[in-house]
Amino acid sequence: MDFKPLSITELTQRLKSLIEGEFPDIWVTGEISNFHHHSSGHMYFTLKDHRAEIKCTYFRGYNQYLKFKLEEGMQVITSGAISVYEKRGQYQLSVRQMEPAGVGTLYLAFEALKKQLQAEGLFDAQYKKPLPKFSRKIGVVSSGTSAALRDIIQVLGRRAPHIELVVRPTKVQGQGAAEDIVKGIEAFQNISEVDLLIVGRGGGSLEDLWAFNEEIVARAIFASEIPVISAVGHEVDISISDLVADLRAPTPSAGAELASLQSTEIADLEQGKFHEIRLKLQSQILEHWQNIDGIEHRLAFQAPSEKIKQNQEKMHQLFHQMQYAIETKQKALQANLFGFEKHLISLSPESILHRGYALATLENGMLIRSQEDVETGEHFTLQTGKGRFEAKKIRNKERK
């Protein structure tokens, strides 16, 4: 023989060099079969189509970032490198990245987290906290420069100017947004007298809204001791935050409306409470009358006429006492309602402006609270009790 035959090891090494050099980074699509998730965290499976198949490894260092659950029969797109296992003379695909074929990764991640949290009970009605009827201070976790925040401010200013609004500006999109939203929710847990939280942002794509589909945000909302309204996107957008919150609002503006009651609505509630108490007292009077009638009927057979007369006098005395109690309660409720209406009127913006005050706003509608909110030379609007006019900041005035 004029040539030296190759050993199996030499042949395999040559093939390894050729194959791995030719396919260092490749995208492959196929169907998952023979899937096995080892206790070490590594994943092993076969990727196949109707004519061929290839064994695959997906090591823990890469698959820990997978946003969906692998299942038998799932069509996927994988990225990785072809490697040769010399001991067995087999080639395989070492997967570094994977996406579902035909269905977005984010959608699958959303469905997986939704299924997990639902199984844990985070969406159950028994954990939903009731919203306060009369909020005095509302916290908002949203972008500090968004149209959504301006909508919330405008709605609350129109419907319930007596409510104090505390804003915690946060990132609502991109890297770090979910963590910042969690910090905002947790920060309000340490602020006294906050009755309600509105957590949300305006509309956008699924990618834009994704921070509100993160597990850490869902768990922060669930753990909040303060009731939470989730107001994310538009009416058609459903987020994980919506499902776990105490109440879902279709838009940020709707969230502000759900969080507040107008003065007329408050008056209606007070009137309804008054009517309820009156009906209750009337029912008690009727019950006492029925009891007295029963006593009178029994005494007619068991006692002389003198006892009947005494009980009749007692009956009339009780009746007059009940009438007096009703009238006293009515007067007290009417006085409380009148006082509450006067207090609401005194808190209205128009009443405050007519007392000589002015409301200063920037061109974007944001309220000016201090001189630092306005740049020198910047125009702004002053609203008084008799009208509004444009103004311009000339300089800062030193405080004494």
Image: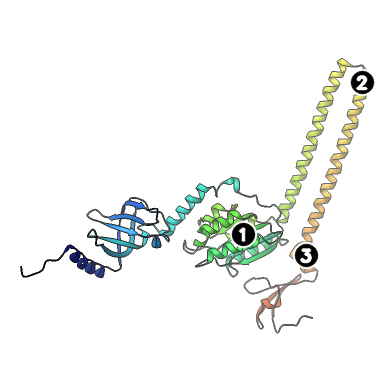
Q: With respect to residue 72, does 94 lie above or below?
A: below
Earlier in the chain: of badge 3 and badge 2, it is 2
- Where residue 20 appears, as percent x and y from the top left, is 26, 68
* Quadrant the N terminus occupies: bottom left
Amino acid type of the residue tagged 2 in the rendering? Lys
Q: Nearer the viewer, mark 1 or mark 3?
A: 1
Earlier in the chain: of badge 1 and badge 2, it is 1
Q: Work out whether residue 248 can be spotted.
A: no
Q: Which residue is mark 2?
A: 307
Q: Residue furthest right?
A: 306
Amino acid type of the residue tagged 1 in the rendering? Ile
Label of residue 198 in the image: 1
Earlier in the chain: of badge 1 and badge 3, it is 1
Q: Are marks 1 and 2 in contact (CB under 8 Å)?
A: no
- Where residue 52 appears, as percent x and y from the top left, is 23, 55
Q: Work out whether residue 319 can be spotted.
A: yes
Q: Are marks 1 and 3 in contact (CB under 8 Å)?
A: no
Tell me how far mark 1 sits from mark 2, CA to CA: 67 Å
Q: Secondary structure at mark 2?
A: helix
Q: Which residue is mark 3?
A: 351
Instruction: Describe the colour scheme in one phrase.
Output: rainbow
Which quadrant of the figure has residue 100?
bottom left
Amino acid type of the residue tagged 3 in the rendering? Ser
Q: With respect to residue 18, does 119 lie above or below?
A: above
Q: Judge left or right: residue 57 versus residue 6.
A: right
